[in-house]
Image (tube, grey):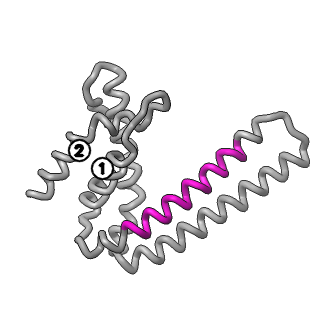
């Protein structure tokens, strides 16, 4: 119960900074956002302290590598919006496949490593919990833009 109260307090305390995370024109405290993500995921996966100690370095490394690959994919997608030849378009498609395969291979490696630290059930829940955090931050931001409060949509 104490753990839940601490998480709830942190979430409420960090909410204003989290809401700004989705607004490109606003500044936000990246450390607060990451602290909230750590608290949210740790709580939702019910990570024990010894699990969390080993889990977070693995997760952070994977997340950084995945972010870099997503940026490369985004760059490829932007380049495909320009007028291009058939040959160049085929090359872009192949580059996308190579990058997507790299992302899949990296995810497989991450899952192999992370299941040595957390249970398979926790590992399966991880992706959904991470997306849930992002959705929650987005909803908080939307609520602030459209009337000041949190959105109650689900």
Q: Is residue 63 left or right of residue 147?
A: right
x 25%, y 26%: residue: 149
Q: Disc 2 vs disc 1: Cβ atoms closer than 8 Å?
A: yes
In percent of width and height, residue 121 lies at 34, 70
Magenta part mainly helix, strand or loop? helix
Q: Is residue 93 left or right of residue 57?
A: right
In percent of width and height, residue 89 lies at 84, 46
- Disc number for residue 36: 1
Q: Residues within 10 Å of mark 1 (few under 14, many from 20)?
A: many
Q: Which residues are magenta?
A: 56-77
The quarter of the picture where the N terminus appears is bottom left
Q: Secondary structure at mark 2?
A: helix
In the rendered image of this protein, does residue 126 appear above or below residue 85? Answer: below
Q: Is residue 65 magenta?
A: yes
x 24%, y 58%: residue: 43
Q: Is residue 83 magenta?
A: no
Q: How many marks?
A: 2
Mark 2 or 1 closer to N-term?
2
Q: Which residue is mark 2?
A: 11
């Amino acid at each position: 119960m104490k753990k839940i109260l601490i998480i709830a307090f942190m979430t409420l305390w960090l909410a204003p900074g989290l809401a700004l995370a989705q607004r490109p024109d606003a500044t936000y405290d990246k450390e607060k956002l990451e602290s909230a993500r750590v608290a949210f995921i740790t709580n939702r996966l019910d990570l024990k302290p010894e699990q969390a100690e080993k889990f977070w370095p693995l997760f952070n490394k994977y997340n950084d590598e995945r972010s870099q690959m997503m940026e490369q994919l985004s760059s490829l997608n932007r380049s495909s919006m320009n007028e291009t030849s058939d040959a160049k378009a085929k090359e872009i498609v192949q580059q996308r496949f190579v990058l997507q395969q790299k992302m899949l291979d990296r995810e497989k490696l991450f899952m192999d490593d992370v299941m040595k630290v957390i249970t398979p059930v926790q590992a399966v829940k991880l992706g959904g919990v991470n997306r849930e955090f992002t959705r929650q931050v987005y909803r908080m931001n939307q609520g602030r833009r459209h009337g000041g409060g949190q959105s109650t949509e689900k």
